[in-house]
Image (cartoon, grey):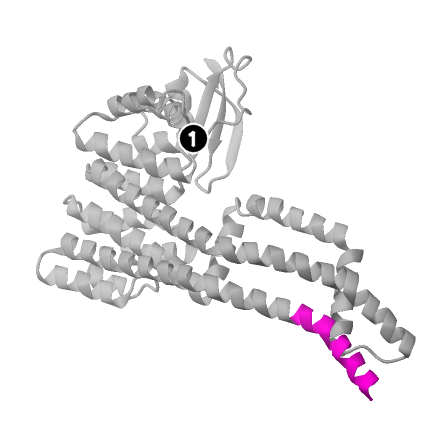
Amino acid sequence: MTTFSYRAYTAEGKKRSGQIDAEDRADAYRRLQRDGLFPEEIVAGSESRGHSLGRRQRRLDSDLQAIFARQLASLLSAGLPVDEVLSILREAGEGSVIDQVAARIRSHVLEGAPLSEALARGGSGYEPYVISAVRAGETSRDLPAVFETIATHLETRRTDRAALATALIYPAFVAAVSLLVCGILMVTVAPQLAAMFEATGRPLPPLTRFMLAATGWIGANAIWLIAGLAAMLIGIPILLRRADVRDRWRTFLLRLPVVGRLMTLEAASQYLRTLALVIGSRQPVVEGVKSATDVLGIGKFRKESLAVTRAIEEGASLSTALTETSFVPRIAAQLVEAGEKSARVAIMTERAAVLVETWLINDRKRLAALIDPILMMVIGGFVLTIVLSVLLPIFDMQSAIQL
């Protein structure tokens, strides 16, 4: 028996590390898998001295994830085996992050791990729903189509995020300049006006008093405000790593008007796309629903999908079970029903997925188009408030002099 040091993840995404005795690396992997863990790295005791498990591995960022998925889709569609595809990607990487990730994933595949687990253990950085989609592709034996769908989804999401970021650039620049000018006015001009009014015994306008009090409070508590902001930026991502906190946060976001609709449509598109993929590969409908359940990352939707699975096992049709969910649009369920009547369930489910994806893309485009004017209105209102707080005392003093 050999002692192996390992770093692994639980089904909830929590990181675990420790040591385990096993015959070899493959046996250690099987033992950890039986314990419900997904090993990321396993190192023999003799190797661990020169190999730090705490060393941070380079992972694929969002852009490289889309590129990597597209490369996998292209090479797998050529009929090449998985290990050879990963070897090609490793050799073509020329020392890049993709080279390193492909090498780690290939080592896990050669040890006998399926590609979905190798992606999770190899530091690919893919989210759990992507790994679940790959697992569904392994079940359906249609990995090229799965990676084609994943690549398209990641590229679309990257494009949408780029559009949102572009829409925020101009308002952010205007906001920064406006806040700088307004800050100068409140720090230099407003206190002098306050001193003049105090000397004459006249009261300042309420808006000016409020803005001076707010400016004074911010100046007195600047250190605490900066510390609180830094704590939020560091603490929130750490808290969201916990499954229970992440689920409550997503439940809260679902209640928001625009964000909730976008999250619901995204979950529906991923669910229907996975369902169509598995059913299209001649797998039973219940297996498709189970695979699609793994794609969902929101606890509420997962419970509803599990109810769909139970309903189908009890004899209900897929379309009838889907109508009981809150995230699948009714028209999508109607398309699935039409597919059941015409014996074209996979085709109609895919059309339902395309329909929901189109809605999602259009909503994201509208949101990107609306962000710019909305932010400009908010910034303009804020600037107007500060300017009025400076001008109102001047107008008040001018009227008093004329009298």
Tell me which corner region of the image, top left, top right, bottom left or bottom right, holds residue 257. bottom left
Q: Quadrant of the C terminus?
A: bottom right
Magenta: main secondary structure equals helix
Magenta highlight on residue 129: no
Find residue 301 and report its horizontal and vertical position in percent.
38, 57
Residue furthest to the top: 46
User: On the rendered structure, is 150 left or right of 345?
Assistant: right
- Residue under numbered circle 1: 123
Q: Is residue 128 above or below residue 32?
A: below
Residue shown at the point (40%, 20%) measured from the top left:
95
Tell me if 195 is positioned left or right of 212 in this view. Answer: right
Query: Dot 1 lies on which element?
Result: loop
Occupied quadrant, residue 68: top left
- Please identify the quadrant where the N terminus is shown: top left
Name the residue nearer the viewer: 50 or 112.
Answer: 50
> Is residue 316 in view from this perspective?
no
Magenta range is 385-403
Residue 246, image x, y percentages: 50, 51
**Type of residue at label 1?**
Gly
Q: Residue at x 35, y 25 (%)?
A: 102
**Would residue 138 be found to the left or right of residue 367 on screen?**
left
Q: Work out which residue is located at the far bottom of the displayed protein and give it.
A: 403
